[in-house]
């Protein structure tokens, strides 16, 4: 898969887990949903929940077992956060770059990183507005970035 802001092609990336449920899987559909809800109430993000279920419980894919993604399960139980996880991660990255640039004014590669990150955020916001996961009038307030992280 090609990289977004460079000419690099690169093949590395994570592999999808098997789509079938192994016969030795110890958990049923309702038990997996209860585990997902338990970890969300503990403050975990959807990607962290998937990693915990994979590593600790041997559940290779929530979707293969339940037929639903972790975010779908959260949406059904009205526990989905108001901003999507990938957008929040980019906002966190932007905050850390801005903090770095306050201390290091002459860091030109850091400034480029800020430009690229804000570009990714803009594109992602446009996508989520099209998919109606964000309101059409939602804008990132760069003056109050830390407000989004609470």
Image (cartoon, rainbow, N blue to C red):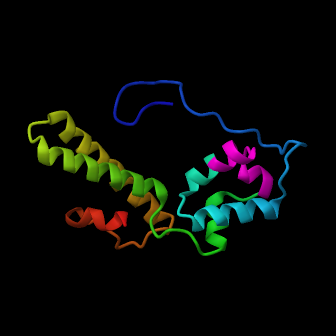
Image coordinates of residue 64 in percent, x first then y, are 77, 50
Task: Report the residue at 60% width, 75% height from top.
Answer: 78
**Main secondary structure of the magenta stretch:** helix
Image coordinates of residue 54 in percent, x first then y, are 69, 44
Residue 32 relative to residue 2: left or right: right
Query: In the rendered image, which quarter is residue 111 located in?
Result: top left
Range of residues picked out in magenta: 52-66
Query: In the rendered image, which quarter is residue 91 located in?
Result: bottom left
Residue 27 relative to residue 128: left or right: right
Query: In the rendered image, which quarter is residue 137 located in?
Result: bottom left
- Residue 47: in sight, yes or no? yes
Image coordinates of residue 90 in percent, x first then y, are 37, 51
Task: Report the residue at 61% width, 54% height from top.
Answer: 49
Q: Is residue 91 above or below residue 106?
A: below
Residues 98 and 126: in front is 98
Q: Is residue 116 above or below residue 139?
A: above
Q: Is residue 60 above or below residue 12?
A: below
Report the quarter where the C terminus lies.
bottom left
Q: Is residue 119 above or below residue 13?
A: below
Q: Is residue 58 magenta?
A: yes
Image coordinates of residue 48 in percent, x first then y, are 56, 51
Q: Is residue 118 magenta?
A: no
Which residue appears farthest toward the right when viewing the image? 23
- Residue 118: in sight, yes or no? no
Task: Report the residue at 46% width, 62% height from top.
Answer: 128
């Amino acid at each position: 898969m090609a990289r977004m802001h460079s000419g690099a092609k690169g093949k590395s990336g994570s592999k999808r887990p098997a789509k079938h449920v192994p016969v030795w899987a110890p958990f049923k559909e309702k038990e997996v949903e209860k585990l997902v809800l338990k970890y969300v109430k503990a403050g975990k993000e959807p990607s962290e929940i998937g990693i915990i279920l994979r590593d600790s419980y041997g559940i290779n894919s929530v979707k293969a077992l339940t037929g639903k993604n972790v975010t779908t399960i959260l949406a059904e139980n009205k526990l989905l956060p108001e901003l999507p996880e990938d957008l929040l991660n980019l906002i966190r990255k932007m905050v850390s770059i801005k903090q770095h640039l306050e201390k290091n004014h002459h860091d030109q590669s850091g400034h480029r990183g800020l430009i690229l990150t804000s570009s990714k955020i803009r594109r992602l916001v446009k996508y989520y507005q099209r998919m109606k996961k964000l309101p059409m009038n939602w804008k990132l307030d760069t003056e109050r970035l830390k407000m989004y992280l609470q």
